[in-house]
Amino acid sequence: MDLLDEIDEPLLLLKMYNLQFGLCNAKVADSYIVGPDGSLYGCFSLVGYKEGKIGDIEEGFNFRYAEFLFSIDRKVVRCLEKKCPFVPLCTGGCFYHAYVEAGDLFETACLQSFYSEI
């Protein structure tokens, strides 16, 4: 039986094992990028975009930082619910790609068809 078939509660799985997937800075706790003006971003590609700003070095983090952290689990859960075998690779997709494709950082940017071709 495939692990994805055994997952009844994806969020429980994430919390039980404190899973963090992928190489994306935006999806790793306590990882952020400092922009040239001192702004903090969760993602290299979002530097300069106000939607990607999570704070600044003088004031600290803003509400956006919490949104980024909570949205990671939601993105992964959506993919696990679809039984996507590529969740460990994409973890719900790139925040930047979601912004470019859907206009919303917190949407899932699915690359399943791309990974299936490789």
Image: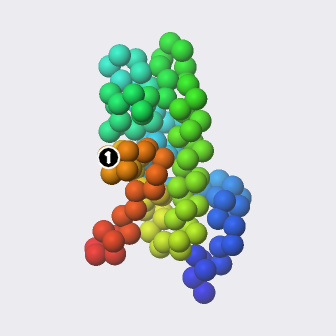
- Residue in front for this viewpoint, 53 or 18: 53
User: From the image, which quarter does the C terminus lie in?
Assistant: bottom left
Q: Quadrant of residue 48?
A: top left
Specify whether residue 22 is in view.
Answer: no
Which residue extends farthest front? 103
Callout 1: helix, strand or loop? Answer: helix
Classify mark 1: residues with Cα within 10 Å, few (<14), some (14-19) or many (20+): few
Q: Position of residue 102 (x, y in %)?
A: 37, 50
* Residue pictured at 42% horizontal, 33% vertical: 51
Q: Residue at x 42, y 59 (%)?
A: 90
For disc 1, the marked residue is: 100
Up the image or down, 69 lies above or below 115; here it is above
Q: Position of residue 106 (x, y in %)?
A: 48, 47
- With 26 as the anchor, is 37 left or right in this view? left
> In this rendering, would 70 be left or right of 24?
right
Residue for point 52% across, 65% down: 79
Q: Which image quarter holds the N terminus?
A: bottom right
Three-letter amino acid code at disc 1?
A: Val
| Relative vertical location of residue 90 with respect to residue 50 in this rendering, above or below | below
